[in-house]
């Protein structure tokens, strides 16, 4: 058997189906959502009369519009407050776990995943945020996705994705102790 990359070892068992052009339906283990890219996705579910496929595989956390200092006065900016209130309502309506603004586990979505043991090696993870790929540092395949994809993952627990190309990096000799 030929050697396989870590990418292949994670990707292959998550493939639900694959078309001849390489378009793949990929099963998603963990879906992280926040207040900025999820409102339209949840509304899309409501309008279509759908429910999340696996609510327990999705975690919501307000992180873009949360005050970083005194939270006792709430959120002063009305648009930011509405986004967070909307996230809270959607989570209540759809049975999604929420680490609210006053929950001690609340934090930046890409920090709380690893902190809370929600990001694990071998998982596929998505979030409507470009920083999602940082979960790869923990041995997961992680993709930042758009709002329509957030809705698709909520509804199906799958992501349509073409298999990315990989590149071999070989280090001969010794790396410095600070690499």
Image (tube, rainbow, N blue to C red):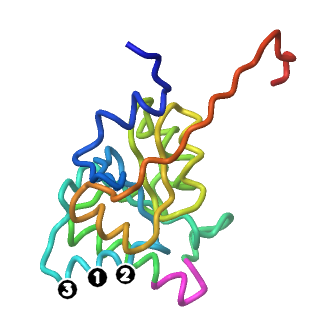
Residue 12: image location, x then y, percent: 33, 34
Residue 101: image location, x then y, percent: 48, 64
Q: Is residue 80 magenta?
A: yes
Q: Residues within 10 Å of mark 2 (few under 14, many from 20)?
A: some
Q: Is most of the magenta stretch helix, strand or loop?
A: helix
Cβ–Cβ under 8 Å for marks 2 and 1: yes
Q: Look at mark 1 in the image and give the residue it sits on.
A: 43
Residue 122 vertical position relative to residue 128 in the rendered view, above or below? above
Q: Which residues are magenta?
A: 75-82
Q: Going by the image, does 69 lie left or right of 120?
A: right
Locate residue 155: give its quadrant.
bottom left
Cβ–Cβ under 8 Å for marks 3 and 1: yes
The residue lying furthest to the front in this view is 20
Residue shown at the point (37%, 67%) measured from the top left: 150
Looking at the image, is mark 2 or mark 3 earlier in the sequence? Answer: 2
Q: Look at mark 3 in the image and give the residue it sits on.
A: 47
Q: Going by the image, does 70 lie left or right of 109?
A: right
Q: Look at mark 2 in the image and give the residue it sits on.
A: 40
């Amino acid at each position: 058997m030929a050697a396989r990359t870590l990418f292949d070892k994670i990707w292959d068992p998550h493939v639900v189906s694959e078309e001849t052009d390489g378009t793949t339906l990929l099963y998603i283990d963990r879906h992280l959502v926040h207040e900025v890219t999820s409102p339209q996705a949840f509304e899309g579910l409501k309008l279509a009369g759908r429910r999340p496929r696996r609510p327990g595989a999705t975690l919501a956390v307000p992180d873009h519009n949360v005050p970083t200092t005194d939270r006792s006065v709430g959120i002063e900016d009305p648009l930011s407050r509405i986004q967070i209130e909307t996230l809270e309502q959607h989570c209540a309506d759809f049975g999604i776990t929420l680490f609210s603004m006053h929950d001690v586990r609340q934090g930046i979505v890409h920090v709380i995943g690893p902190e809370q043991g929600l990001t694990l090696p071998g998982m596929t993870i998505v979030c409507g945020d470009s920083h999602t790929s940082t979960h790869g540092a923990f041995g997961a395949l992680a993709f930042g996705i758009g709002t329509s994809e957030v809705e698709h993952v909520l509804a199906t627990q799958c992501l349509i994705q073409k298999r990315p190309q990989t590149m071999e990096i070989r280090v001969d000799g010794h790396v410095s102790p600070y690499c």
